[in-house]
């Protein structure tokens, strides 16, 4: 999205154009179903050459609890991808400047929404980490206070034992 969507290209690296001579945006998944079925074969011949080998996955893969954040990030990106496609097509065709600007606004709003969602999630994670840190800090301080108290008690007990020992020591020589 940040660098723009790629154009469809043939195996010689030439743009694939529609009947009006406009470049065509490369295929990309638009929803969870097409994302799960995506294996690169849907892309243009030139793009396939630059893609790594990957396979489809079941839709259930993203439904796993450990993939919840990934699934949400993927869902948040679809509107931005679609808006990026519209912007790219508007920039490459003879569409009016007003339509281009409207599509730019939609694109940037979708980017802002995706970033806002990520920012909110990051802030929540940071807040959780801070709460854990504060709890551990309080536990450490409490432990240090407990140890200081025990050290003081042991020092007092040691001092009392030394005094008792000093009283007993002279009596040892009396036998």
Image (cartoon, helix red, strand yellow):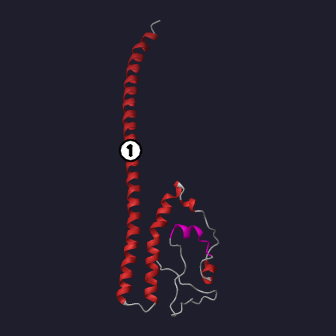
Q: Is residue 63 above or below residue 14?
A: above
Q: Is residue 8 left or right of residue 80?
A: right
| Residue 155: quadrant of the picture | top left
Magenta segment: 31-40
| Residue 160: quadrant of the picture | top left
In this figure, which residue is indicated by the disc labeled 1?
Answer: 135
Residue 33 colored magenta? yes
Residue 123 colored magenta? no
Residue 7 spot, x, y in % from top left: 53, 84
Residue, x 52% and y 86% (percent of image)?
Answer: 24
Residue 141 spot, x, y in % from top left: 37, 40
Q: Is residue 136 left or right of residue 58?
A: left
- Tell me how many marks there are: 1
The one nearer the camera, 165 or 122, is 122
Residue 126 spot, x, y in % from top left: 39, 56
| Residue 54: quadrant of the picture | bottom right
Residue, x 43% and y 87% (percent of image)?
Answer: 91
Residue, x 61% and y 75% (percent of image)?
Answer: 40
The one nearer the camera, 7 or 31, is 31
The one nearer the camera, 149 or 55, is 55
Residue 34 spot, x, y in % from top left: 55, 70
Q: Secondary structure at mark 1?
A: helix
The 10 Å Cα crowd at callout 1, few under 14, some 14 to 19, many 20 or more, is few
| Main SS class of the magenta portion in the image | helix
| Residue 1 seen in render | no
* Residue with the most extreme top position: 175
Residue, x 59% and y 69% (percent of image)?
Answer: 37
| Residue 127 seen in render | yes
């Amino acid at each position: 999205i940040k660098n723009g969507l790629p154009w469809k290209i043939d195996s010689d690296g030439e743009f694939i154009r529609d009947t009006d001579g406009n470049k065509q945006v490369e295929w990309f998944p638009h929803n969870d179903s097409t994302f799960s079925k995506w294996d690169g074969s849907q892309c243009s011949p030139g793009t396939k050459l630059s893609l790594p080998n990957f396979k489809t996955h079941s839709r259930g893969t993203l439904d796993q609890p450990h993939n919840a954040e990934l699934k949400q990030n993927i869902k948040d990106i679809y509107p931005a991808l679609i808006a990026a496609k519209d912007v790219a097509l508007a920039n490459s065709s003879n569409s009016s400047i007003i339509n281009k600007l409207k599509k730019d606004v939609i694109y940037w709003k979708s980017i802002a929404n995706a970033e806002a969602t990520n920012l909110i999630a990051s802030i929540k994670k940071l807040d959780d980490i801070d709460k854990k840190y504060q709890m551990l800090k309080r536990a450490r301080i409490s432990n240090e206070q407990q140890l200081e108290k025990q050290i003081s008690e042991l020092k007092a007990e040691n001092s009392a034992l030394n005094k008792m020992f000093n009283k007993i020591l002279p009596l040892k020589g009396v036998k």
